[in-house]
Image (cartoon, grey):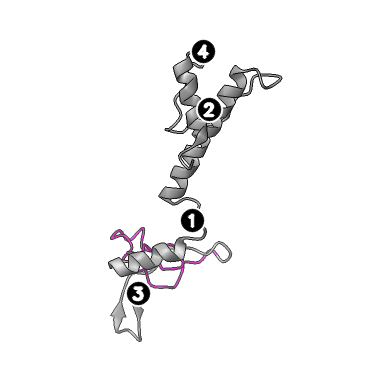
């Protein structure tokens, strides 16, 4: 395929229109695969190199951070809160606080270790774990 009035030669995109069943007329990106069967234009999924400089990488990180709920600090805090809640449920079940035995769902956090609450030392550990590190 030639563009710019025949001055530039390049691969043609191998994408097809689902409506017209014709091949795309756009040139394939240089960053796309070397194989001519996978050469794609920017509209049909041509590979991007992405940001290469540190400044560009930081700009992308900043642009893609919408709320911060899944930063490492936020995930760590949620994991600690999950462990605290599981210890509270264990204590409640041990003292028959609920009408039936409660179970928590999902995978336990890395901070939760099941304790034998009939042992007074482990009961104290569970109570202290429920107080959290903020207090």
Q: Can residue 62 be seen by looking at this rendering?
A: yes
| For marks 3 and 4 on the same chain, the one whose residue lies earlier in the sequence | 3
Residue nearer the viewer, 59 or 81? 81
Residue that carries the numbered disc 1 in the rendered image? 68
Q: Position of residue 97 (x, y in %)?
A: 66, 21
Residue nearer the viewer, 25 or 45? 45
Can you say whether 31 is above or below 114 in the image? below
Q: Position of residue 26 (x, y in %)?
A: 42, 73
CB-based contact (under 8 Å), mark 3 and mark 4: no
Q: Secondary structure at mark 3?
A: loop
Q: Secondary structure at mark 4?
A: loop
Give the distance between the C-alpha atoms of the residues marked 3 and 4, in whole angstroms: 78 Å
Q: Residue furthest top?
A: 118
Q: Position of residue 128 (x, y in %)?
A: 48, 29
Are there few (<14), some (14-19), or many (20+) residues within 10 Å of tag 1? few
Q: Secondary structure at mark 2?
A: helix
Residue that carries the numbered disc 2 in the rendered image? 87
Are there few (<14), some (14-19), or many (20+) residues within 10 Å of tag 4? few
Q: Nearer the viewer, mark 4 or mark 1?
A: 4
Residue nearer the viewer, 8 or 57? 57
């Amino acid at each position: 395929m030639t563009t710019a009035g025949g001055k530039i030669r390049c691969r043609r995109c191998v994408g097809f229109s689902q409506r017209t069943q014709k091949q795309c007329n756009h040139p394939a990106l240089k960053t796309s695969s070397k194989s001519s069967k996978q050469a794609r234009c920017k509209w049909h999924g041509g590979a991007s190199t992405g940001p290469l400089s540190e400044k560009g990488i930081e700009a992308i990180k900043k642009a893609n951070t919408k709320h911060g709920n899944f930063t490492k600090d936020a995930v760590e805090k949620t994991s600690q809160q999950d462990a605290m809640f599981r210890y509270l449920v264990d204590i409640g079940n041990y003292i028959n606080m609920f009408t039936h035995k409660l179970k928590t769902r999902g995978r336990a956090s890395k901070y939760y270790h099941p304790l034998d609450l009939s042992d007074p030392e482990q009961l104290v550990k569970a109570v202290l774990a429920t107080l959290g590190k903020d207090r």
